Image (cartoon, grey):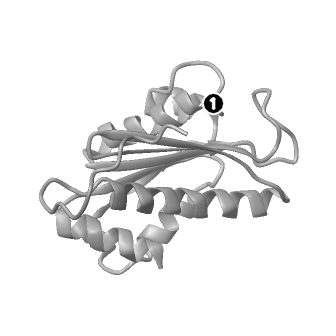
Amino acid sequence: MLCARIGTRLRAAGEHLAIAESLTGGMVAQCFAAAPDSSDWFLGAVVAYQKRVKFQVLSVPEGPVITEQAATAMAEGVKRLTGAHVAAAVTGAGGPEGQDGQPPGTVWIAVVARGATTTRQLHLDGEPPEICEQAATATIELLCEVLEDHPSEEHPSGDHASDDHS
């Protein structure tokens, strides 16, 4: 289970995680909450479903919320709110209609960790529940990749990868 693997890495580094979610409605946080010893390293999550919550609580700039900039602002906002060392965010159009000029299945993920911001855009297919599940899984996978590519300074374990702004 990737959430347990992420937790092991965070716990070993003495780091804490926070999550900001929109389209996934808490699915990512649920996975982390169910992981072993999560109370040691998982601080919590903000589910900011409506735009105004993203703007007011997470300091996302007014405008479209299915963008790289919005995902990054969400991750930075939840990191700031909770005092986490590592934060991830996911926003997107789950369907069946598009949003902000983006077709259903458009998703942006951002991870802020260890001095780097990594983002990823996805174009997913399926019904809204399938898109949400795929987006949640992709968020956890990206977080795991980032933690493996950017080892903590306390416990270096390999080469440092450059920032991936794909």
Q: Classify mark 1: residues with Cα within 10 Å, few (<14), some (14-19) or many (20+).
A: many
- Residue 138 image offset from top left, x and y in percent: 59, 59
For residue 134, side relative to residue 11 (left or right): right
Q: Amino acid type of disc 1? A: Val
Numbered-mark total: 1
- Residue 165 image offset from top left, x and y in percent: 49, 37
Asked whether the viewer can see residue 103, the reply is yes
Q: Residue at x 25, y 57 (%)?
A: 151
| Residue furthest out toward the top | 62
Q: Above or below — where is 42 with respect to 120? A: below
| Residue furthest out toward the front | 159
Q: Which residue has dot 1 on it?
A: 65
- Residue 112 image offset from top left, x and y in percent: 37, 43
* Residue closest to the eye, 146 or 3: 146
For residue 28, side relative to residue 33 (left or right): right
Quadrant in which residue 10 is drawn: bottom left
Q: Above or below — where is 51 with respect to 129? A: above
* Residue closest to the eye, 90 or 33: 90
- Residue 70 image offset from top left, x and y in percent: 55, 30
Asked whether the viewer can see residue 43, the reply is no
Q: Residue at x 61, y 54 (%)?
A: 25
Quadrant that contains the C terminus: top right
Q: Above or below — where is 25 with respect to 144? A: above
* Residue closest to the eye, 22 or 90: 90
